[in-house]
Amino acid sequence: MLAGVFRFVCCNGLVVGTVANDIRIPHKGNIQSDVVEGALQVLDDFQAVDASTDAMKSLTLKVEEQRAFATAALALRYGERTEDQSPVPITADQLIEARRPEDLGPSLWTTFQRVQENAMNGGQSGRNTQGRRIQTRAVRSIDRSVSLNRALWVLAEEMRRLRVG
């Protein structure tokens, strides 16, 4: 079980938390009490997540900070690139583009939401290594999705901590 935030408007499947929030219950024997206990622990963890999202909503980012967040997210999504490797297919500016009016705004939360959705769902026009036009692909692997979402959450939390003090 993992604590997660799902937006009703698009159900983008944002998963937040650290490994400490990952509760695993073996599927053997009488597991009812373990499941209930795990659910209660996730609920407790979610209160911290709620406080974090409120803090992100109240923090305004400059355009350069939004771009820095997106640049770090590109490295998380496509891996670190060296000079001898091909560049990522899209830019940081494409990653912070809003897909809907609700995602407009300079807050850390809206920036995080835009970057998360664009990184996970793909669909941006870009260029492959040969220079041909492509559309970025969505992340389909559950493991990769959880891993990338966790990394983006950590990135947002660290940006919040840096800005707050």
Image (cartoon, grey):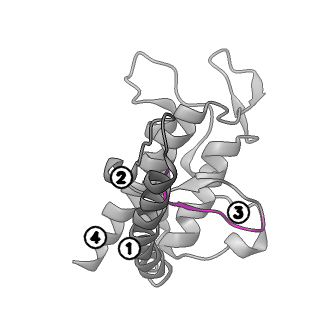
Q: Is residue 45 above or below residue 121?
A: below
User: First in sequence: mark 4 or mark 1?
Assistant: 1
Q: Nearer the viewer, mark 3 or mark 2?
A: 2
User: First in sequence: mark 3 or mark 4?
Assistant: 3
The residue where tag 3 is placed is: 98
Nearest the eye: 141 or 97: 141
Query: Gap in Å between the C-alphas at discs 3 and 4?
Result: 24 Å
Query: Gap in Å between the C-alphas at discs 4 and 1?
Result: 14 Å
Q: Is residue 92 above or below residue 98?
A: above
Query: Gap in Å between the C-alphas at discs 3 and 1?
Result: 27 Å
Residue type of the residue flagged with mark 3: Ala
Helix, strand or loop for the magenta stretch, by majority: loop
Label 4 secondary element: helix
Image spot of residue 20 (x, y percent): 31, 52
Magenta region: which residues?
A: 1-9
Residue type of the residue flagged with mark 1: Ala
Label 1 secondary element: helix
The residue where tag 1 is placed is: 48
Query: Gap in Å between the C-alphas at discs 2 and 4?
Result: 16 Å
